[in-house]
């Protein structure tokens, strides 16, 4: 048990006398050390939680005591019969008014006796806490040998530190909490909200949740333990990511209010154990990934019976109704696959550098949110039967070609609804179109727009000329000039269609 002023006062051999009875609540505060100094401002040489011992009256009593209180000094002892008899009344009044415990030290009691008592209690408390930490770590290590190693470790940690412990999965959802029912709705929301930016960053980091704050984070840190609770009485939690950078497996949240150094060491050990337990599943995950790829290729080859026979015992039943095929790509598809692994009833597989997802048309799987979380680009096919996967895969691939930063996940339905000319909305098409009409713009910068109006009106000169505000013979001359520059006969439908497509694609490029 740590040293307190109440324990000091209870020692008859020290003969200490409390002079400020109104501060009894502060007598049980932990004392970290005892130090003696008679300088006017000793606070630069003191730490919060220490007891200060003096033998003379300070010059400015009020300001002197105020500095001690602001600095977090646990108590003040005045040694009598050294400089003067008795404790100054002004010092007693100031300590009483400002709530600083003040006790009188008789001449027969050396300051070293007080310091030795505090030091002995601090050493004993440190030894006791270290012994507890060893026992707690041993109990947690034994828990790791149970079938559900991760759950057993977290449950044992919660029991040892007597604080709630929670695990947020890679998908940002609360996976489990110990002890059962320990978290309030406010605490659950605070934990998941604070874990979200840590998971999105996809690097090892620590943060906090609760206590009226958001989730501050520090890269590559250990458990960031905070010693206080929130104003509404909810717990403050220390958050630590689990797993390797780029492929986090979750976030561990530990109630941190009042945890001392020994408890923090135990928590740090559990972070390592939990991370190891999750990483040990990599081999199983790799085997499941290879199995998924085999099932996908069997489906793609049209052997549905083989795919279902292989998939059902391990991966579950394959979708039976109309499905949409999604093809996703990016640097974080492995992390995205870890999230999809937590969603039952959904089939996905790695196909080379791509992630392929079969999405039940009647139950969308939240792919837009997944693409946004992991910065993926992809496309989704129209709904169709499993027997037409090849066609659906081609549709999804075509849609992905048109994905960009503003629309990272494109649907084939949207592209098909735009007609054939919508397929011109690609970088390659725009580059070819710009090069094709460049000679027209070089000759006359208004010529491409005049041709676009003429083609929009089906090559009818009178109507197009009125819209352009020119004579029809002038427009005929300009069309003839375009034919000469391009070396084509715009009287044919094929030539007109090709020019119209180029003008459309080049216009998209300028937009």
Image (cartoon, rainbow, N blue to C red):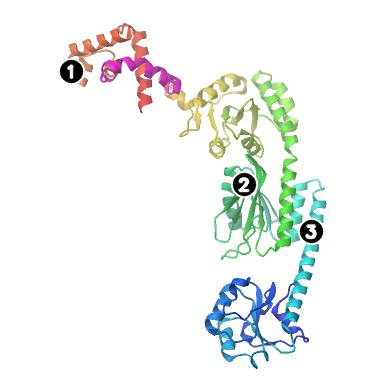
Q: Which residues are magenta?
A: 423-449
Q: Nearer the viewer, mark 3 or mark 1?
A: 3
| Picture residue at 62% right of the left edge, 86% below the top | 56
Find out whether the residues at labels 2 and 3 contact each other: C-beta distance under 8 Å: no
| Residue placed most toward the observer, 449 or 422 | 449
Find out whether the residues at labels 1 and 2 contact each other: C-beta distance under 8 Å: no
| Residue placed most toward the observer, 158 or 93 | 93
| Residue placed most toward the observer, 320 or 162 | 162
| Residue named by callout 2 | 173
The extreme left residue here reads 471
Overall secondary structure of the magenta stretch? helix
The extreme bottom residue here reads 85
Q: Which mark is residue 136?
A: 3
**The residue tagged with tag 1: helix, strand or loop?**
loop
Which x, y percent locates residue 390? 59, 19
**Compared to 366, does 78 lie above or below?**
below
Check if residue 448 falls in the magenta segment. Answer: yes
Which x, y percent locates residue 191? 60, 53
**The residue tagged with tag 2: helix, strand or loop?**
loop
Circle 3 Cα neighbour tier, 10 Å, few/some/many (<14 / 14–19 / ≥20): many
Quarter-of-image position of residue 363: top right
Q: Nearer the viewer, mark 1 or mark 2?
A: 1
Q: Nearer the viewer, mark 2 or mark 3?
A: 3
| Residue named by callout 1 | 470
| Picture residue at 25% right of the left edge, 20% below the top | 446
Judge left or right: residue 40 versus residue 313: left
Real-space CA distance between mark 2 and mark 3, rounded to the nearest whole angstrom: 28 Å
**Compared to 74, does 176 lie above or below?**
above
Circle 2 Cα neighbour tier, 10 Å, few/some/many (<14 / 14–19 / ≥20): some
């Amino acid at each position: 048990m740590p040293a307190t002023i109440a324990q000091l006062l209870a020692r008859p051999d020290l003969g200490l006398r409390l002079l400020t009875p109104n501060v009894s609540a502060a007598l049980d505060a932990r004392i970290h050390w005892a130090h003696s100094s008679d300088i006017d401002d000793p606070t630069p040489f003191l730490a919060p939680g220490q007891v200060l011992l003096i033998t003379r009256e300070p010059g400015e009593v009020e300001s002197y005591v105020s500095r001690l209180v602001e600095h977090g000094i646990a108590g003040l002892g005045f040694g009598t019969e050294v400089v003067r008899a008795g404790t100054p009344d002004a010092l007693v009044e100031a300590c009483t008014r400002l709530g600083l415990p003040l006790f009188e030290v008789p001449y027969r009691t050396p300051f070293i006796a007080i310091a030795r008592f505090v030091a002995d209690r601090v050493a004993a408390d440190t030894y006791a806490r270290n012994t507890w930490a060893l026992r707690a770590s041993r109990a947690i290590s034994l828990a790791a040998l149970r079938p559900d190693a991760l759950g057993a470790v977290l449950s044992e940690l919660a029991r040892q530190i007597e604080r709630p412990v929670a695990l947020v999965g890679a998908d940002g959802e609360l996976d489990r909490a110990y002890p059962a029912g320990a978290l309030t709705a406010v605490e659950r929301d605070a934990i998941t909200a604070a874990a979200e930016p840590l998971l999105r960053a996809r690097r090892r980091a620590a943060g906090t949740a609760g206590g009226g704050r958001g989730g501050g984070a520090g890269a590559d840190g250990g458990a960031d333990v905070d010693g206080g609770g929130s104003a509404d009485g909810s717990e403050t939690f220390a958050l630590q990511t689990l797993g390797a950078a780029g492929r986090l497996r979750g976030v561990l949240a530990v109630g941190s209010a009042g945890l001392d150094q020994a408890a923090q060491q135990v928590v740090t050990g559990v972070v390592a154990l939990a991370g190891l337990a999750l990483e040990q599943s990599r081999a199983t995950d790799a085997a499941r990934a290879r199995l998924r790829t085999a099932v996908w290729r069997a489906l793609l080859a049209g052997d549905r019976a083989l795919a279902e026979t292989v998939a059902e015992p391990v991966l579950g039943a394959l979708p039976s109704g109309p499905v949409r095929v999604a093809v996703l790509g990016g640097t974080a598809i492995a992390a995205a696959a870890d999230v999809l692994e937590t969603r039952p009833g959904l089939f996905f597989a790695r196909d080379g550098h791509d992630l392929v997802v079969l999405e039940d048309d009647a139950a969308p799987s939240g792919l837009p949110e997944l693409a946004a979380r992991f910065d993926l680009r992809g496309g989704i096919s129209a709904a169709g039967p499993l027997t037409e996967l090849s066609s659906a895969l081609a549709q999804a691939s075509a849609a992905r070609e048109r994905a960009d930063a503003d629309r990272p996940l494109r649907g084939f339905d949207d592209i098909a609804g735009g007609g054939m000319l919508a397929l011109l909305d690609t970088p390659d098409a725009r580059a070819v179109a710009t090069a094709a009409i460049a000679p027209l713009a070089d000759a006359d910068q208004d010529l491409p727009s005049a041709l676009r109006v003429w083609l929009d009106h089906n090559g009818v000169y009178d109507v197009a000329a009125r819209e352009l505000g020119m004579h029809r013979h002038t427009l005929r001359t300009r069309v003839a000039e375009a034919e000469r520059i391009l070396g084509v006969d715009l009287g044919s439908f094929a030539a007109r269609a090709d020019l119209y497509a180029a003008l459309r694609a080049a216009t998209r490029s300028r937009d």
